[in-house]
């Protein structure tokens, strides 16, 4: 089993890409909607929540853990790797370097949680590749709206918070919930180029599994879904998003 988690169903944007590369994999998806949002919590709070999820996966003998959450990756992965040296952690991060490689002179909007944007990990990346034309936008509350799937509120949020950046070329989706509303963002910003880390993470997962000779393809695809709030609607939404 490969464990994949996020602070809710947002990480489905990552799992969908993983399944394209591992179509007969066995996965447990842990949707921690009880603790959503991670982005506004302290580092200690997020780390202690994440440790609980890691232990849940280890009790189920997961061979790898994918942190399908930019916030949890930014805050926790270094500490997790030192505390659990025998566990394979694959972490996502905002693809800011990719923007630089693709369009070094372009104007970029980085949308992410407050936790990600102020993390040491992200700031190191930002300072390395910043071209002076980047806006860092903490999108407090947006992941919650996506979690609830309320289209009217999502549209209103985007009108109020990102419309002023119309004319921008690149948009970094630095939270795994945001790829789920690409169409809404395009409605507000026009034809922008999106960047998100899900493909990179999926390739890295496969690379690491091969490197360690871990079996990861079986007879058929199996996905176990668990939501920490036990809300039945989460499972329905997850299944619907996996089919999209
Ligand atoms: N999906 C999470 C991420 O990628 C953020 C949502 C939250 O704030 O919990 O950062």
Image (spheres, rainbow, N blue to C red):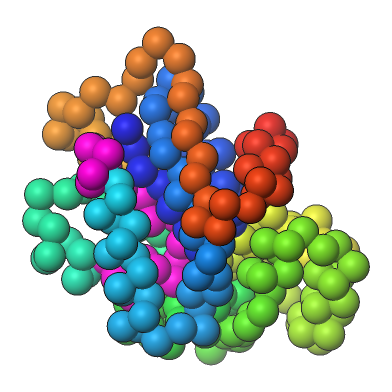
**Count of all numbered marks drawn on residues in the image:** 0
Residue 43 placed where, x, y %?
A: 35, 83
Q: Nearer the viewer, residue 4 or 91?
A: 4
Residue at 50% of width from left, 70% of height from top? 35
Residue 177 placed where, x, y %?
A: 61, 61
Q: Quadrant of the N terminus?
A: top left
Residue at 51% of width from left, 40% of height from top? 225
Residue 168 placed where, x, y %?
A: 73, 76
Quadrant in the picture for residue 118? bottom left
Q: Relative to residue 150, is residue 136 depicted above or below?
A: below
Q: Relative to residue 18, is residue 168 depicted above or below?
A: below
Q: Relative to residue 126, is residue 62 depicted above or below?
A: above
Camera sees residue 197:
no
Relative to 83, 178 lies left or right: right
Task: Magenta stretch: give its range.
Answer: 58-77
Residue at 63% of width from left, 43% of height from top? 235
Q: Which of 123 and 175 is in front in this view?
A: 175
Q: Is residue 166 magenta?
A: no
Quadrant in the picture for residue 174? bottom right
Q: Quadrant of the C terminus?
A: top right
Q: Which of 77 and 147 is in front in this view?
A: 147
Residue 56 placed where, x, y %?
A: 30, 50
């Amino acid at each position: 089993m490969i464990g994949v988690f996020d602070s809710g169903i947002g990480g489905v944007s990552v799992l969908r890409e993983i399944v394209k590369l591992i179509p007969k994999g066995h996965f447990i998806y842990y949707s921690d909607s009880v603790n959503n949002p991670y982005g506004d919590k302290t580092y200690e709070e997020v780390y202690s929540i994440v440790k609980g999820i890691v232990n849940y996966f280890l009790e189920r003998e997961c061979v790898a853990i994918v942190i399908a959450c930019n916030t949890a990756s930014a805050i926790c992965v270094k500490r997790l790797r030192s505390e659990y040296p025998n566990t394979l952690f694959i972490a996502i991060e905002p693809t800011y370097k990719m923007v630089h490689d693709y369009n070094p002179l372009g104007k970029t909007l980085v949308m992410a949680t407050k936790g990600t944007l102020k993390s040491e990990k992200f700031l190191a990346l930002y300072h390395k590749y910043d071209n002076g034309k980047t806006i860092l936008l903490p999108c407090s509350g947006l992941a919650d709206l996506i979690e609830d799937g309320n289209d009217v509120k999502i549209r209103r949020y985007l009108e109020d918070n990102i419309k002023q950046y119309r004319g921008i070329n690149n948009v970094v989706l630095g939270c795994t919930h945001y790829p789920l509303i690409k169409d809404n963002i395009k409605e507000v910003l026009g034809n922008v180029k999106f960047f998100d880390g899900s493909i990179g993470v999926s390739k890295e997962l496969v690379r690491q599994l091969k490197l360690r000779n871990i079996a990861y393809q079986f007879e058929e695809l199996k996905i176990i879904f668990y939501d920490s709030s036990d809300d039945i609607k989460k499972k329905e939404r997850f299944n619907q998003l996996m089919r999209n």
